[in-house]
Amino acid sequence: MISGAGIAGPTLAYWLKAAGFEPTLVERAPVLRSGGYVIDFWGLGYDIAEQMGLLPDIDRSGYHVQEMRVVDDRGRKLAGFGTRVFAELTGGRYVTLQRSDLSRLLFEKIKGRTEILFGDEIVAVREDPKCIRVELEHAGERCFDLLIGADGLHSAVRRLAFGPQTAFEKHLGYVVAAFEVRGYRLRDQDVYLMYGQPGRMVGRFTLRDDRTMFLFVFASTDTHLPASPDQQKAMVRDVYGGGGWECREILAELDQTDELYFDRVSQIRMPSWSRGRVALVGDAAFCVSLLAGQGSALAMISAYVLAGELAATPERYQEAFARYDELLRTHMETKQRAAERFAGAFAPKTRSGLLFRNLVIKTFAIPGVARLAFGRDIADALPLPNYNWPPDDGCGGGRNRHGPDDEEEDRSE
Ligand SMILES: Cc1cc2nc3c(=O)[nH]c(=O)nc-3n(C[C@H](O)[C@H](O)[C@H](O)COP(=O)(O)OP(=O)(O)OC[C@H]3O[C@@H](n4cnc5c(N)ncnc54)[C@H](O)[C@@H]3O)c2cc1C
């Protein structure tokens, strides 16, 4: 049983299915979410997407951003640089796309081949010697070999199996909000525009079909955020009211949207990603936050490695869980530390910090500097294990059709 059909969940279901397991996916939302924020996507996540045959679709859905531009109160360019450097450093394997598009494309790879329960969620779990009993809010109780939480930063599986969110969440001192609208008057194709004031930034990105995405990141140490969309909008209005550039126009658009993404910028840090028959992947296990700019790829890597390790020893899931943790922990912790360091640069809290940040961005326009600055961080230091997956036979067939504990049953037969 996999909880969550975002990025990690469908990726895990796909690879488990390829290895001969029979996953069931439960997603709390009644349908896959659309719209929302955009993500940069490259590295090992991109390689996994390629193995899943997704690159042509990702390329069609994605954008190749040409410039990152910081603007002042009146929209004049303060700093910026050509983002071709990212394409150069990755051999052209770098794309910007909506998170919801990546999620949809991953989901389409398992649709019709995997049991999927929309509009339901796990409300209780209990481990028996032979299985994990999962109580679903609507579908009642069911028994599974394993339960994997792929349900994001606020994972219910983590809460039910490991303890409260507060025990594992590290708030990075910022709040993020994002939304998408149609018909916004000002458009700048393939340019990511950013406007900052001390402790707050807002970004605008022009999408296809007359759509525009806005992103807000602002400093806040408040861990209790408003729950209702109206209160959330009021908080954004409060922070950005009186801001320069297009703040007034963007806040007017905020009134029109029904779908506002709104959350704390946090990381998840856990001493272990598994307990008994339960394991976690993606943001549920090690959320690196938006500041790492790579959470989706990392979510896919964790799903791929967990599936590969389970396929290697399907009858000994404890060993697979342990190897999964061992292979990825250092990598994820390094990404978390880098994101924490970067937090101050994304939305500097002081005027001098902002000036310094813009000065640094200006230097990226000098030939070679951006390449030098990003070169080290952009390459994934982790080699992607080769699990010798069987060829995709179109119906998720695989080389072993066993689930955990099957060997024991086979022996008794
Ligand atoms: C503003 C922003 C910008 C970002 N930019 C980037 C970027 O540039 N590059 C990048 O790679 N990453 C980026 N990220 C991070 C990236 O979006 C996440 O790391 C990634 O989505 C994690 O995938 P996931 O599958 O673990 O979790 P999610 O994508 O959060 O998916 C979790 C799924 O579980 C479902 N769910 C939740 N609770 C339950 C429940 N109780 N029961 C059942 N289902 C449940 C949710 O509805 C959702 O479908 C960004 C994030 C933000 C917020």
Image (tube, rainbow, N blue to C red):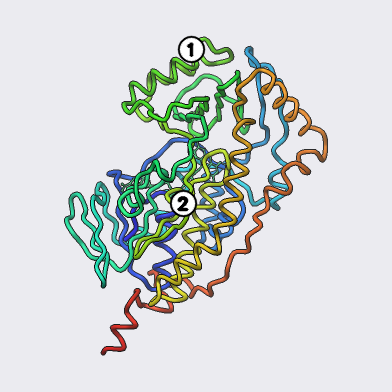
Q: Quadrant of ligand 1?
A: top left
Disc 1: CA contacts within 10 A as few (<14), some (14-19) or many (>=20): few
Instruction: Kindly give the residue lying farthest to the right in the view shown.
Output: 367
- Image side of residue 130 versus residue 178, left or right: left
Q: Which residue is mark 1?
A: 241
Q: Which residue is mark 2?
A: 270
Identity, as a three-letter code, of the amino acid under mark 1: Gly
Label 2 secondary element: loop
Give the quadrant of the C terminus: bottom left
**Placement of 188 over or under 28, stated as above or below:** above
Query: Is residue 383 in view from this perspective?
Result: yes
Q: Nearer the viewer, residue 47 or 328?
A: 328
Percent from the top left, x then y, of residue 391?
A: 49, 73
- Distance between the Cα atoms at labels 1 and 2? 38 Å
Identity, as a three-letter code, of the amino acid under mark 2: Met
Q: Nearer the viewer, mark 1 or mark 2?
A: 2
Residue for point 41% across, 56% down: 280
- Image side of residue 374 versus residue 124, left or right: right
**Placement of 272 over or under 260, stated as above or below:** below
Residue for point 48% across, 27% down: 221
Query: Is residue 105 in view from this perspective?
Result: no
The earlier-in-sequence mark between 1 and 2 is: 1
Q: Nearer the viewer, residue 176 or 18?
A: 176
Percent from the top left, x then y, of residue 209?
A: 48, 33
Percent from the top left, x then y, of residue 46?
A: 57, 54
Label 1 secondary element: loop
**Placement of 111 over or under 197, stated as above or below:** below
Q: Nearer the viewer, residue 284 or 250?
A: 284
Percent from the top left, x then y, of residue 265?
A: 49, 35
In the image, which disc is placed on residue 338? none
Q: Is mark 1 within 8 Å of ligand 1?
A: no
